[in-house]
Amino acid sequence: MISIIITSREEPITIGKCIRCIADKGYSGIPENFEVLQVSPDKETLEAGKKMAKELGLSDTQYVQIIDPQKGKPFALKMARTKAKGDIIIWTDGDSYFGRNAMKEILKPFKNPKVGGTSGRPKSMDSKENTFGYWGHLLSDSADHRRIDTMEKTSGGYYISGKEFFPMSGYIMATRKTTFDIPSNVLSDDAYISYQLRNEGYEIAYVREAECFVKYPTTLKDYYKQKVRSLGGFIQLKRMGIFKRDKQSRSFIIELGYAFYVFRYAKNIKEFVWSFALFPVRLWTWIRIFWERILLKKGMPKGGWERILSTK
């Protein structure tokens, strides 16, 4: 059985499309035996999800709602994982949507018993004709490049970890149902799960054909809020002692090694200027991470995640 966990808060406009692209078998290629677990705190998002489930004709066993107590996304994920009945769990967010046959593609690597988790490919749904839209495409494509550069391509067409790997993306990832804990204060839950699976001896796979379309921040305030949390989460993971089988994969020094890729990505003068403009923004991001995560040792905000409004 396959369980799909969708975390969604105040996203009544997008949750329906998210559920449809997963549970519509003709579009997603999902197996017959599945359940969708929607975890939301607000009435509007829950009602929108229920409306879509009714349109798709999902039964009470195929679509389950879980009231999120708003103790943070990791707490919501743990709560949903406890209720999930599937041997394989697919994790995603209610403000993104899967591409055609993404469900079918992301499950293929699990035929290999050594594979414990699989990541799909996040792609920006924003226009590339403005600064923030261009940055969204650049950063999502650079993550794709990191994965195929550090992992080995198999005869099945997907990539698999060996000596190195790059963490899965929480926008579209699938894992075997494991028993390890997910700390309620963890800032980068997808990275935590990725490293824990590796520590347990599993391999991580990457399927480029399993696409997930994502809206990225369109203001500097939201950009910093998102990146300081996600990138800064690796500082927290280091304190947790999670880097056992593998070394840390995100840091300021590691990012400097990708400077050439940023300029090579640009296809014209306008994009070159936007690529150049990203450097001071990323530098300030890492300065803020150093200040908040290392000096002040800030953790999870009270009440859990802060919403990134411009991505909704």
Image (cartoon, rainbow, N blue to C red):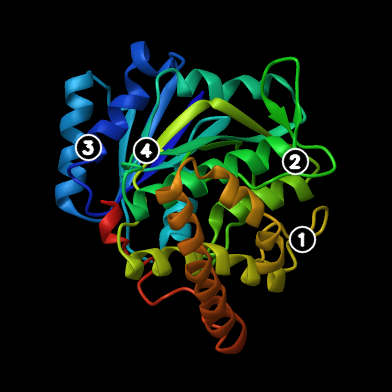
Q: Earlier in the sequence, mark 1 or mark 3?
A: 3
Residue hosting label 2: 150
Residue hosting label 4: 37
Distance between the Cα atoms at labels 3 and 2?
Answer: 38 Å
Q: Residue at x 79, y 58 (%)?
A: 247
Q: Earlier in the sequence, mark 3 or mark 2?
A: 3
SS class, disc 2: helix
Where does the image place residue 256, in percent across and percent down from the top left? 67, 62
Where does the image place residue 278, in percent across and percent down from the top left? 48, 62
Q: Is residue 117 left or right of residue 311?
A: right
Q: Which is closer to the viewer, label 1 or label 3?
A: 1
Q: Nearer the viewer, residue 55 or 133?
A: 133
Q: Earlier in the sequence, mark 2 or mark 1?
A: 2
Q: Amino acid at mark 2?
A: Thr
Tell me whether the residue at label 2 lies in contact with that at label 1, contact meaning CB atoms closer than 8 angstroms. no
Tell me whether the residue at label 1 lies in contact with that at label 4, contact meaning CB atoms closer than 8 angstroms. no
Question: Dot 3, crowdedness within 10 Å: few (<14), some or many (≥20)?
Answer: many
Q: Which is closer to the viewer, label 2 or label 4?
A: 2
Distance between the Cα atoms at labels 2 and 1?
Answer: 17 Å
Tell me, yes or no, if residue 82 can be seen here: no
SS class, disc 1: loop
- Residue 243, which numbered label? 1
Q: Earlier in the sequence, mark 2 or mark 4?
A: 4
Q: Amino acid at mark 1?
A: Phe
Q: Is residue 268 left or right of residue 95?
A: right
Question: Dot 1, crowdedness within 10 Å: few (<14), some or many (≥20)?
Answer: some
Q: Which is closer to the viewer, label 2 or label 1?
A: 2
- Residue 49, which numbered label? 3
Q: Earlier in the sequence, mark 4 or mark 3?
A: 4
Can you tell which quarter of the image residue 236 is in? bottom right
Height in image: 160 above or below 269? above
